[in-house]
Image (tube, rainbow, N blue to C red):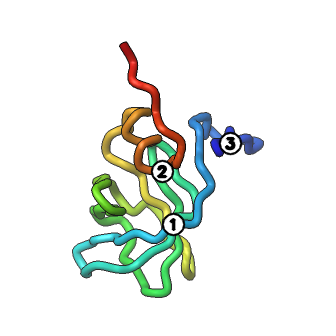
């Protein structure tokens, strides 16, 4: 399910998961229903029908998963969010991967 980000000239080297999941994005302008297009331990690309302010704090929520971050770019319907902290792999995989995560001992 995970794909390596391979983009010429890009500094993205973290694993990104391409998904189509619904979530809520909370910003100072209010809550918006969004679709997660792809997500990594460092950020996410979202899609929204509603306009979202750029360069502001945001919280991405899906079920029991919450991640605080900053909206770093917006286009007509796409949104880029950079998380304030890198998510631990186990937390990320349990939230966005249907396969069980083995416990580390």
Indicate whether 15 appears above or below 56. Answer: above
Mark closer to the observer (2, 3): 2
- How far apart in space, not on screen, are marks 1 and 2 (Cα)? 9 Å
Q: Are marks 1 and 2 in contact (CB under 8 Å)?
A: yes
Tell me which residue sits at (36%, 76%) in the image. Answer: 53
What secondary structure is found at the residue carrying circle 1?
strand
Q: Earlier in the sequence, mark 2 or mark 3?
A: 3
Which quarter of the rendering shows the N terminus? Answer: top right
Q: Are marks 2 and 3 in contact (CB under 8 Å)?
A: no
Q: Is residue 55 left or right of residue 49?
A: left
Q: Earlier in the sequence, mark 1 or mark 2?
A: 1
Q: Which residue is mark 3?
A: 3
- To which quarter of the image does residue 28 belong? bottom left
Tell me which residue sits at (49%, 62%) in the image. Answer: 80
Q: Are marks 1 and 3 in contact (CB under 8 Å)?
A: no
Indicate whether 86 appears above or below 83. Answer: above
- How far apart in space, not on screen, are marks 1 and 3 (Cα)? 17 Å
Tell me which residue sits at (48%, 38%) in the image. Answer: 100
Q: Is residue 52 left or right of residue 49?
A: left
Q: Which residue is mark 2?
A: 96
Q: Picture coordinates of residue 67 (x, y %)? A: 31, 53
């Amino acid at each position: 399910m995970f794909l390596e980000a391979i983009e010429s000239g890009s500094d993205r080297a973290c694993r990104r998961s391409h998904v189509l999941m619904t979530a809520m994005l909370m910003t100072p302008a209010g809550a918006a229903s969004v679709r997660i297009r792809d997500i990594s331990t460092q950020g996410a690309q979202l899609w929204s029908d509603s306009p979202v302010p750029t360069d502001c704090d945001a919280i991405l929520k899906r079920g029991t998963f919450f991640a605080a971050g900053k909206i770093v770019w917006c286009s007509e319907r796409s949104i880029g969010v950079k998380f304030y902290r890198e998510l631990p792999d186990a937390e990320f995989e349990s939230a966005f991967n249907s396969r069980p995560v083995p416990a580390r001992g």
